[in-house]
Image (cartoon, rainbow, N blue to C red):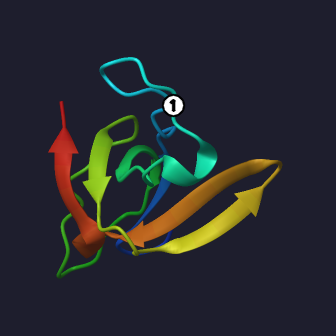
């Protein structure tokens, strides 16, 4: 099943949370920070007012509490509006 977003919405899949620190300390589940970096899965067509500035496969930085969580076929996705995307990460 494919999710096809409408208007200025983007379907993203969140990156996995870091399990170890740079110094090698393993983090427990509660100590992990929610990642804010996601991968774009699908992009809507945009609107006459909003130009879509991301493409499928881009890694992006999104607002921490934005979007709608959706679970489909065992995968978790978030549908966000273009305005909730803060930057593209290289």
Is residue 4 visible from the viewing direction of this image?
A: no
| Residue at image coords 32%, 38% | 58
Q: Position of residue 5 (x, y in %)?
A: 52, 65
Residue, x 24% and y 60% (percent of image)?
52
Q: Quadrant of residue 34?
A: bottom left
Q: Residue at x 28, y 47 (%)?
A: 60
Taking 18 as reference, is 53 above or below it? below
Secondary element type, mark 1: loop
Q: Position of residue 28 (x, y in %)?
A: 59, 41
Q: Measured from the top left, where is residue 36 in percent x and y?
A: 35, 53
Quadrant containing the C terminus is top left
Query: Local crowd at mark 1 within 10 Å, few (<14), some, or many (≥20)?
Result: some
Q: Residue furthest right?
A: 73
Q: Residue at x 48, y 47 (%)?
A: 32
Q: In which quadrant of the rendered view does residue 4 lie?
A: bottom right
Residue highlighted by disc 1: 19
Above or below, 58 against 79 in this view is above
Residue most extreme to the top: 24
């Amino acid at each position: 099943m494919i999710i096809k977003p409408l208007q200025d919405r983007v379907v993203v899949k969140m990156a996995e949370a870091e399990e170890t620190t740079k110094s090698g300390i393993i983090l427990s589940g509660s100590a992990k920070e929610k990642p804010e970096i996601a991968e774009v899965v699908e992009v809507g067509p945009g609107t006459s007012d909003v130009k879509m500035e991301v493409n499928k496969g881009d890694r992006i930085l999104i607002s921490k509490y934005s979007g709608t969580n959706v679970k489909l076929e065992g995968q978790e996705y978030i549908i966000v509006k273009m305005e909730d995307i803060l930057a593209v990460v290289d």
